[in-house]
Image: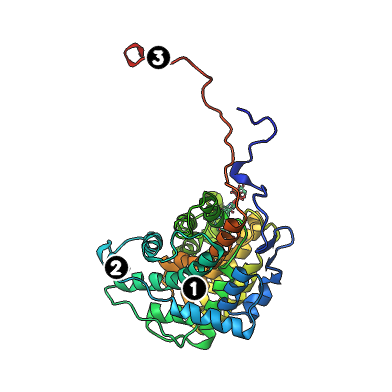
Amino acid sequence: MDRESSQLIRGLEGVVAAPTQLCDLDGTHGRLAYRGYDITDLARHASFEEVAHLLWHGDLPTGGELDRTTVALIAARDIPRELVETFRLTPKDTDPMRALQTAVAILGMRDPDATDNSHAANLRKAVRLTSQIATAICAHHRVRSGQSPIPAAPDLGHAANFLYMLTGRRPSTVTAKAFDASLTLYAEHELNASTFTTRVIVSTQSDMHSAVAGGVGALKGPLHGGAGEAVMRTLMEIGEVAHVDAFAERALAEKRRLMGFGHRVYKAGDPRAAILRGMAEEACRQSGQFKWYEMAVKLHARINAAKGLIPNVDFYSAPLFYSLGIPVDLFTPVIAAGRIAGWTANILEQHDDNRLIRPRGEYVGPKRRAFVSVDKRA
Ligand code: SDX
């Protein structure tokens, strides 16, 4: 193979695959910024609408720009009737991430800009997909529960409206703010597996809906976005604070892969986990389910002491989402509802300065050999 110069790097670990102005991820010092703004400031002071605008347009919006982005997001919340019909036809136990992947494909059938990869069209699609994905996740959940979808509330912001469409109840300001900050914390994270997937797809000059459907597929995996749900199922398996030590003992002895721990890039701590820990403490206390937070803190300490593993973004988002009343199998779709902002921003960036993404493989198969016709094969 004509590849003398390059070498095999499993999982592309540490490989820099593209320049980006979106996300500055410092894995050594555990720092994260979107377009120069530290994630702690954004989670604390900016709405998800402001952060999405920042990722798409490069700057935090002025008041007028924020109004325009907010109005556009509200106007784009409807989903096609045939998508709701499709949810009615699919098996009730369909994985919500598979339903979401289907939804993105169907949204692409109806989108007036579906095959237009221009910057302006991609910006319009980024807004539509960000709103429609939220509606689709909630509509699917209502239909699979035997209920009708709840129409969006035009007076509610993106995060509050999501919770309203999911539960039928208008969330408290505290709950809405915690969920809004969660969407911001999940919005963007450089070339993680699902974002890189979207870039590979659009690097062939394919379109945004095709790429987002691919990103949903990558995020679904338990090594990536699926970890949050797995963390909650671990906490539910443990059951009580008093059982954490015995569980940790067993898991370490069995060398189990502990979901919510470890990260390919962060080695000194995931800054998002620290923020989510504080939010989880507040939300678990407010909802009278403090034990989940206590269990998480205890498990964190035991595993960190035993293996030096750090909790990642999915570790404390699990008790937080659970205490906000989000069904466990919707944790990953909720992550997608945040990451859609980053996926679409990366797609804009890739389409605007594209080069086909095509790495090489290292051939380790049989040496070249002569063909043998089937009648002569033993
Ligand atoms: C996300 O990339 C991103 O930015 C992702 C993300 C984003 O915002 O997009 O941050 C979101 O996906 C967070 C990660 C969620 N996944 C999990 O929580 C699943 C559990 N975590 C692991 O599977 C693992 O830590 C990964 C997949 C996240 C990272 O794995 P790496 O970099 O491939 O590291 P590795 O699997 O090679 O592990 C290195 C060592 C191994 O020990 P040895 O076999 O060399 O002795 O650390 C151990 C691993 O066994 N290890 C773990 C572990 N994570 C690493 N051991 C037990 N439990 C774990 N969770």
| Among the two numbered marks 2 and 1 on one chain, the one whose residue lies closer to the N terminus | 2
How far from the left and from the top, in percent, is residue 222?
Answer: 49, 56
User: What amino acid is at disc 1?
Assistant: Phe
Q: Nearer the viewer, mark 2 or mark 1?
A: 2
**In the image shown, does 47 or 256 lie closer to the viewer?**
47
Q: Which mark is residue 321?
A: 1
The alpha-carbon separation of the residues under discs 2 and 3 comes to: 53 Å
Q: Quadrant of the N terminus?
A: top right
Q: Around disc 3, counting alpha carbons within 10 Å, would you say few (fewer than 14), some (14 to 19), or many (20 or more)?
A: few
- Does 6 sit above or below residue 103? above
SS at badge 1: helix
Q: Looking at the image, do the residues carrying marks 2 and 1 touch, with CB atoms under 8 Å apart?
A: no
**In the image shown, does 220 or 352 lie closer to the viewer?**
352
User: What amino acid is at disc 3?
Assistant: Val
SS at badge 2: helix
| Among the two numbered marks 3 and 1 on one chain, the one whose residue lies closer to the N terminus | 1
| Among the two numbered marks 2 and 3 on one chain, the one whose residue lies closer to the N terminus | 2
Res. 94 in view: yes
How far from the left and from the top, in percent, is residue 353?
Answer: 62, 55
SS at badge 3: loop
How far from the left and from the top, in percent, is residue 240?
Answer: 48, 70
Q: Quadrant of the C terminus?
A: top left
- The structure residue drawn at horizontal position 73% and vertical position 58%, both measured from the top left corner, is 28
- The structure residue drawn at horizontal position 52% and vertical position 53%, both measured from the top left corner, is 202
User: What amino acid is at disc 2?
Assistant: Glu
Q: Looking at the image, do the residues carrying marks 2 and 3 touch, with CB atoms under 8 Å apart?
A: no
The alpha-carbon separation of the residues under discs 3 and 1 comes to: 60 Å
Q: Around disc 2, counting alpha carbons within 10 Å, would you say few (fewer than 14), some (14 to 19), or many (20 or more)?
A: few
Colour scheme: rainbow
Q: Which residue is mark 3?
A: 372
Q: Around disc 1, counting alpha carbons within 10 Å, would you say few (fewer than 14), some (14 to 19), or many (20 or more)?
A: many
Q: Which residue is mark 2?
A: 82
